[in-house]
Amino acid sequence: MPIIRMTLIEGYDDDTRLRLATRLTDAIRATIAAPLDAITVAIDEVKPSSYMRGRVTRTPGVPLPAPVDIVRDYLAKMEARDLAGASAHLADGFRMTFPGGATFARLEDLVDWAKSRYRFVTKTYEGFDEAFGENGVTVYCRGTLAGEWPDGTPFSGIRFIDRFTMEDGKLTDQQVWNDLAEASKG
Amino acid sequence: MPIIRMTLIEGYDDDTRLRLATRLTDAIRATIAAPLDAITVAIDEVKPSSYMRGRVTRTPGVPLPAPVDIVRDYLAKMEARDLAGASAHLADGFRMTFPGGATFARLEDLVDWAKSRYRFVTKTYEGFDEAFGENGVTVYCRGTLAGEWPDGTPFSGIRFIDRFTMEDGKLTDQQVWNDLAEASKG
Amino acid sequence: MPIIRMTLIEGYDDDTRLRLATRLTDAIRATIAAPLDAITVAIDEVKPSSYMRGRVTRTPGVPLPAPVDIVRDYLAKMEARDLAGASAHLADGFRMTFPGGATFARLEDLVDWAKSRYRFVTKTYEGFDEAFGENGVTVYCRGTLAGEWPDGTPFSGIRFIDRFTMEDGKLTDQQVWNDLAEASKG
Amino acid sequence: MPIIRMTLIEGYDDDTRLRLATRLTDAIRATIAAPLDAITVAIDEVKPSSYMRGRVTRTPGVPLPAPVDIVRDYLAKMEARDLAGASAHLADGFRMTFPGGATFARLEDLVDWAKSRYRFVTKTYEGFDEAFGENGVTVYCRGTLAGEWPDGTPFSGIRFIDRFTMEDGKLTDQQVWNDLAEASKG
Amino acid sequence: MPIIRMTLIEGYDDDTRLRLATRLTDAIRATIAAPLDAITVAIDEVKPSSYMRGRVTRTPGVPLPAPVDIVRDYLAKMEARDLAGASAHLADGFRMTFPGGATFARLEDLVDWAKSRYRFVTKTYEGFDEAFGENGVTVYCRGTLAGEWPDGTPFSGIRFIDRFTMEDGKLTDQQVWNDLAEASKG
Amino acid sequence: MPIIRMTLIEGYDDDTRLRLATRLTDAIRATIAAPLDAITVAIDEVKPSSYMRGRVTRTPGVPLPAPVDIVRDYLAKMEARDLAGASAHLADGFRMTFPGGATFARLEDLVDWAKSRYRFVTKTYEGFDEAFGENGVTVYCRGTLAGEWPDGTPFSGIRFIDRFTMEDGKLTDQQVWNDLAEASKG
């Protein structure tokens, strides 16, 4: 039965307000066992000149791009080996960690390392999750890998999961787990 | 600069209200680039007899246990091989999927299967993430494994990640990825 | 989907707040075709020292007795010929109008007039309606009459309706229609 | 001193919002003895994309026609013997009850029955009342009848009252009381 | 940490809403030691047909001219000896009191009296203060005087303060203190 | 017709909430010509654990002492020549300016200087004004002085006004104007 009233400075588009309302609903449902139909969110908007904090008017924070969209685009560019395009999503200090604990700071190093593991790989997504926390958004992406081993043998259906952290819309960390070793072991 | 006003039927404890306010704050920060200090949440409580939806009064939904706590307890019990205790956290229809795609419905089957992989294993946690979505809460847990291979050789620092879905406080699905195969390969 | 937020100075009992919420719900349903479950009413209460209108604090208006209860009690006392008790419900200037247009200002005059119409009469209620308008509350009471004609012949099931207007909890006007003439005609 | 804050999805016309505010005011005045000037109603409107219940946006309920207007139109059409037009206001299962307990389901049957009672009849209205309850709106209409007896003698000033119940803007029941029998008796 | 929500009938210009928000902020800061950044004011506006007090819609009160602007204009016109222009700012019954307790009702009398004190005088403003109280606004204006004594000797830097009370935008009282006597004494 | 809704963390005493509501009312009346009776202020209080800004709970700012009370006490102590007591109200860097432009940083210096002007002086207050601005509170105090000239001749009814600025409840500046020179001149 919670009623959420959110006040924003006017100007956000429909999509942003819907995303806010959806996420607020989900946050409540995760915390108390309220029936879904009993959670109401209403957003009212005030003029910029009708909002003052600390005796000064304020500029509304811009809508952030959907974290999942950023991850999807990064992964698509990596799959297409568009390293320049993929790099545009990376924050300074970005690091990635791969199975076995291999870590890289540059996409080129990853590509080199991967050569000994597979000729190419494509991802089929089963789902994405977004976790919101004190340090921002974490995106999880999971599904299966298909491709060819270094010797050209094809593989497919190999489980993977990636974990991304973000800051100001840029990726700061990527962690990868998958069953490639399980599969190649056999 | 968003102001969130949440109305609850009175009776929730401090901890639940703080958790609600924290999660609402995080949901907003994930959506618009508002400075943290500009996000205000205030919760007001009304008497049960002061709330009516559809012309009838309502009972407030009970606070849900923190999803991470459920997962922690389940994992601790599994580590201690307290299968009965761990089972108490499982929903009907619970399934788990392990590296290589092995799936189990019963904890006993998992234990049997694991015997060929390691003598025992303990987990050191690096972090937990909670994702709230249309279908409830997903909990991620990651860190490193230590233990002994079947031949008694010790191992440690092996990366893992677990993904749990929940329904009404019970675990419905567990998916596990780790670098055990990477490590044992070498 | 209307959300009603009502602010009261604290101190009203559960019953009054529930009655307020119910009546607000009904008023909305009579005006827009909102599904019942979509109408939410929440009442918050502020301390007397937290409410100021026109720079002065205010005393909350006392709860009014339920209009239907007043009418019920008046009618019960009339039926029991407790004229003194019934009179306590009447405002100065009370008037009543009976079938054929007979009007009375005093209950005694009504009783005299009624003698030629029936020996006694009792009321079975089918329902009450309360209408709230600019000039206060109007109560309707309808059902059937049973009793004896002046010659002692019994009658029953004769339709009646009474209309009452009120001011400050006192009855100011009563209008009566019934089928006694229809019945006695035959 | 009650303050009512009502939140609607935007789009209702002035007339509907004024009717809502008026009816909310009347509902409060009928419940607590607040001075009229101390009852404030303010309606704020949110965009359709700013309202979510149960994680989905909602369509605002359409304004209902004023119940009194429906009754007025029905009665006018009956008086003009426009039975087709009057029928358009009737719900399936409509029933009417007339003095003496005569009940009809079809307007034609009423017209036949009435022939033995008067040649024609017109209504002069003294007032209408609307009662809002759990089962919707009840409309009362009262005033005087004028017309001609079957023998052509004129009559006038004969008291009547009609009670209508409605569902979704259609009349479900009409109950009629009047003093025709009183008048014709003499 | 106070959150102020103010509801106005729509139509006030940006400047008026900003002035309202500023003054509300200042009033709070004068009363509780809240950090400035913790005081939030948001103004929402409702349609004229969405506001009802005492069952009738209301016309919003017009914005009042800034009290300081009225005082500035009055003083400028006095300095320019535009007595007609200055008079336009005076309420009926206006009175002014000057050093030594000399009181005048008409500007002409003040001008006559001042002739024995100085040939002319101009004001340099150091600051204005506005005090809001039960009886409206009080404006203080302080700074220094420059001009010539009756014998033509120049003077400057002489401290003064004026106190004005207002009603409906007209000056009702002026009280003047200054150091002219201190200065001329020597 | 403005409605003010103020949300505080619970715990302020009646007096503080009344003072807040009064000052908010006065601030509005100084800005728009709303009838006094149309200005409503309602304060709701939330639990400390129900308020979060920037993801952390907050401690409510303590109520500030009434500025006028501080000034009254300071002036009373000065009149009684309780310099230690008066000094307790002074901020570091306090300065005072007296007629003719004499400025002092220490109360003792003022007392010495005053000896040549009067033997003693007492104040009769006509009124106090409080002005709230960006830099805090300014208090004005005005009335008449009585006492004895250095030669023992009594005087009375001499107009004065004092202006005080404050910071965190301590006086930072005092400016004094009066008609002593006017009076002694004659």
Image (cartoon, coloured by chain):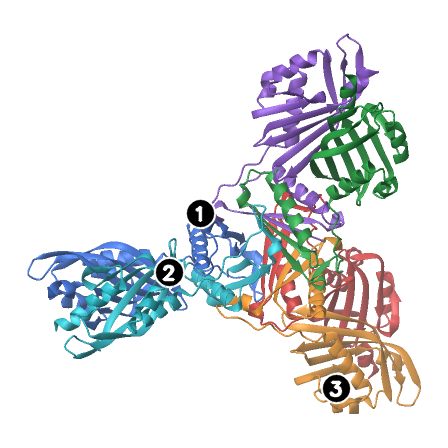
Chain colours: A blue, B cyan, C green, D purple, E red, F orange
Q: Secondary structure at mark 3?
A: helix
Q: Which mark is residue F86?
A: 3
The residue that label 2 is drawn on is: B170
Q: Position of residue B76 (x, y in %)?
A: 33, 72
Q: Position of residue D76 (x, y in %)?
A: 67, 20
Amino acid under label 2? Answer: Lys
Residue furthest top in the image: D151
Mark 3 vs 2: CB contact within 8 A: no
Measure how far apart labels 3 and 2 are at the Cα level: 68 Å
Q: Which mark is residue D56?
A: 1
Amino acid under label 1? Answer: Val
Q: Disc 3 or disc 1, which is closer to the eye?
A: 1
Q: Residues within 10 Å of mark 1 (few under 14, many from 20)?
A: some
Q: Secondary structure at mark 2?
A: strand
Measure how far apart labels 3 and 1 are at the Cα level: 65 Å
Q: Nearer the viewer, residue E89 or A24?
A: A24
Measure how far apart labels 2 and 1 are at the Cα level: 26 Å
Q: Mark 1 — on which chain does it sit?
A: D
Mark 2 vs 1: CB contact within 8 A: no
Quadrant of image for the C terminus of chain F: bottom right
Q: Would residue B147 appear left or right of F151 to someone viewing this image?
A: left
Amino acid under label 3? Answer: Ala
Q: Mark 3 — on which chain does it sit?
A: F
Q: Nearer the viewer, residue B147 or C56?
A: B147
Mark 3 vs 1: CB contact within 8 A: no
Q: Which mark is residue B62?
A: none
Q: Secondary structure at mark 1?
A: loop
Q: Mark 2 — on which chain does it sit?
A: B
Give the vertical position of C15 relative to F89 (above or below). Answer: above
Q: How many marks?
A: 3
* Disc 3 and disc 2 on one polypeptide chain: no
Q: Position of residue A29 (x, y in %)?
A: 44, 57
